[in-house]
Image (spheres, helix red, strand yellow):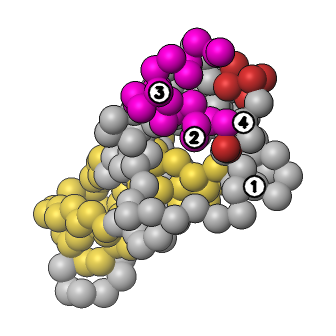
Amino acid sequence: MDFISQWSGSHIDAAVGVIRNSQVTANELTVLRGISTGIISASKAVVVDNEKNITGFNRVVSASFRGNYSELQDRTTDPADNPIAGFRFFYYKNGELFTKNPDGLVSRVGGGKETKFDFSNVQSIVCAHNYGVKYPLVNIIGSDDFTLEGQIFYQDTNTVVVSFNTPKSGQVFIRTV
């Protein structure tokens, strides 16, 4: 008589019956040994924690993903590596969504931002837009609502300086697309 049978009618007997009838092998059950819920363990099963969270995936490949929302961490730089052929990286940088293809081409995704800078009787204006974009669009409108000509200097990815030959008044619009 096997040891488990001594406990006939107990929860153990019911559990063993489920295992026996499921055709699960001993090797398959061994795979589950040592798994921590919510943590990825190489060559083992993935088991979610009590809040249905999982930590530790390096890369997930799927034909599609569905869900209520996605959460990406904001970053200040582009990823150093490129995705493998046929895939894209999606990431937030300075509050905007970007994508990077396998050739390393980075593109901003979605609607743009716009910031207006008013100026009055100046020969230059420093526009700190903080978009993290190397060459945003710059429109200069004079106080008479016509476009002004000025020298545009892209100081860095967050700052544009506009200079004029003589003092001018108006507005500078910095946009991303």
In the image, residue 170 above or below residue 51 = below
Can residue 135 be seen here?
no
The residue to which callout 4 is attached is: 24
Q: Is residue 114 left or right of residue 169?
A: right
Query: CA–CA distance between discs 3 and 2?
Result: 14 Å
Secondary structure at numbered mark 2: helix
Picture quadrant of residue 76: top left
Report the front residue among 78 and 153: 78
The amino acid sitting under disc 2 is: Val
State which region is magenta.
Answer: 1-20
Query: CA–CA distance between discs 1 and 4?
Result: 36 Å
Q: Position of residue 151 (x, y in %)?
A: 46, 59
The residue to which callout 1 is attached is: 87
Query: CA–CA distance between discs 2 and 4?
Result: 10 Å
Query: Of the residues under marks 1 and 2, which one precedes in the sequence?
Result: 2
Q: Give the label on residue 18, or none.
A: 2
Query: Of the residues under marks 1 and 4, which one precedes in the sequence?
Result: 4
Query: Of the residues under marks 2 and 4, which one precedes in the sequence?
Result: 2
Query: CA–CA distance between discs 1 and 2?
Result: 42 Å
